[in-house]
Amino acid sequence: MQDFIRINQNDKVAVALKPLAAGLALFIDQKELILTEEIPQGHKFALCAIKKDEPVIKYGFRIGYAKEDIAPGAWVHVHNLRTALGDVLEYKYEPELCPLKKTEPAAFMGYKRADGKTGVRNEIWILPTVGCVNSVAKSIETAAKARFSLKEGVEDIIAFAHPYGCSQMGDDQENTRKVFADIIHHPNAAGVLVLGLGCENSNIPVLMDYIGGYDSNRIKFLQCQDVEDETEEALRLIAEICETASKDQRQPCDASELIIGMKCGGSDGLSGITANPTVGAFSDLLISKGGTTILTEVPEMFGAETILMNRCKDKETFEKTVSLINDFKNYFIRHDQTIYENPSPGNKKGGISTLEDKSLGCTQKSGSAPVCGVLQYAERVKEKGLNLLSAPGNDLVASTALAVSGAQIVLFTTGRGTPFATLVPTMKISSNSKLAGHKSNWIDFNAGEMVEEKSGEEVAKALFEYVLKVASGEKVKAEAAGFHDIAIFKQGVTL
């Protein structure tokens, strides 16, 4: 395994791939460089002298300014590096498009739905319309699993608890209702029991306008205040859904039907070098076969947004991306919060120093494909290819948003590890082999091999093949553990 990596030839810093001792002699550009202090794994060190207020370059782009003079071989981190970012900006469209060549088709075994969508799971979901019935929903899940023993064809019965659906106003409540409708129509759900209370703002009659047309054999509604025994009535309705869903069978589906969400969390200094570029290469490969990917967590695009903007397929998409970025900045400003209050303590411990550093690594997940679509929160994907989605960086909120917009699987890269899962299979991809070994009960795929014995192309192809297996029914670690969560983006006041 190599000791360090210089990502771009123009970089003024390199990244340690393992802990490096002070006094270690390295040879870079045929010159000797002596490390002046210990460099932790994932952290940066200076390749040349950097004067105070000069830009620090990584990934070929500025990640901030030096707070003080930095000597060659010195550790570069939050103590001597500051962000260079400002507030709301004006942007110019300077397209740099690299359309992808089509590659040979690929296939997986999925579920064809009557509305033309394709699912990778055949589950029955219990969706509360309000947090007041969360415990009832969980009780129904337990009873249903015991009673029906998951008939052949029904892969799981899952209740999704959340605290919303009432005491919300305006756009905040509107988004919650859209989320409910998107979940109800998600192709991974063979059927849904919509469980209401009866007095909430987003009650079942109100939701009907958002839900639109539906298959009454697969979508059932129960308002708890209207029946004497809500559990028994729910089990009766679930039995009816099971009768239909148990007849569903997997069949060959083209990879062009896949919609894959891309998210990172608990990142470290290797995330932008191994895991995120691996997902980016996967994204390009899927898109080259006619598939779709979605990139979100807008605040972690700040500082790298122009790279995405210049890859927009046309001026209209560029303008939507500008609005995506500036609207989110204004969201921070409206709440009197610092726009660049990032990275997190865990990110910093892992070697990420500024938001530019984090964002340039985060956006590696987008690969090189043109940006074809820009989605508002809770908007379903329409365009094939790479899409950008408006959602915050919070892991559960952003991952739920990806699923709500249509992702059948979420690829989640991490350098520090996390166990959670959202509505859909949530695949954990580690940035380093140490994490993959230490938390093997969480990690599904190790991208750390990219800086060991395997090439980036080999690792990306392995990830693509693994995604096809998961799409065909193989469970990821969080699914096998029974982890399922949703988190709705709370944007307004609570009554």
Image (cartoon, rainbow, N blue to C red):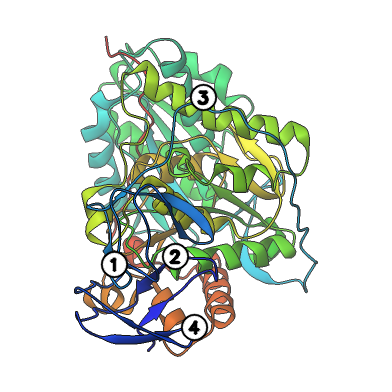
Cα separation, mark 3 vs mark 4, equals 44 Å
Which is more N-terminal, label 2 or label 3? 2
Disc 1 or disc 3, which is closer to the eye? 3
Disc 1 or disc 2, which is closer to the eye? 2
Q: Nearer the viewer, residue 485 or 218?
A: 485
Image coordinates of residue 319 in percent, x first then y, are: 68, 30
Question: Which residue lies under the disc numbered 4?
Answer: 29
Crowding at dot 4, Cα within 10 Å, few <14 / some 14-19 / many 20+, comes out as few
Which is more N-terminal, label 2 or label 4? 2
Q: Residue at x 24, y 80 (%)?
A: 20
- Three-letter residue code for mark 4: Asp
Does residue 139 lie above or below 132 as drawn? below
Q: Give left or right: position of 135 versus 124.
A: left
Question: Which residue lies under the disc numbered 1?
Answer: 442
Quadrant holding the N terminus: bottom left
Q: Residue at x 44, y 19 (%)?
A: 204
Quadrant holding the C terminus: top left
Cα separation, mark 4 vs mark 2, equals 12 Å
User: Circle 2 — which element?
Assistant: loop
The label number, if any, that marks residue 12 in the structure image: 2
Question: Which residue lies under the disc numbered 3?
Answer: 327
- The quarter holding residue 253 reads bottom right
State if disc 4 and disc 3 touch (CB < 8 Å): no
Q: Give left or right: position of 246 versus 108.
A: left
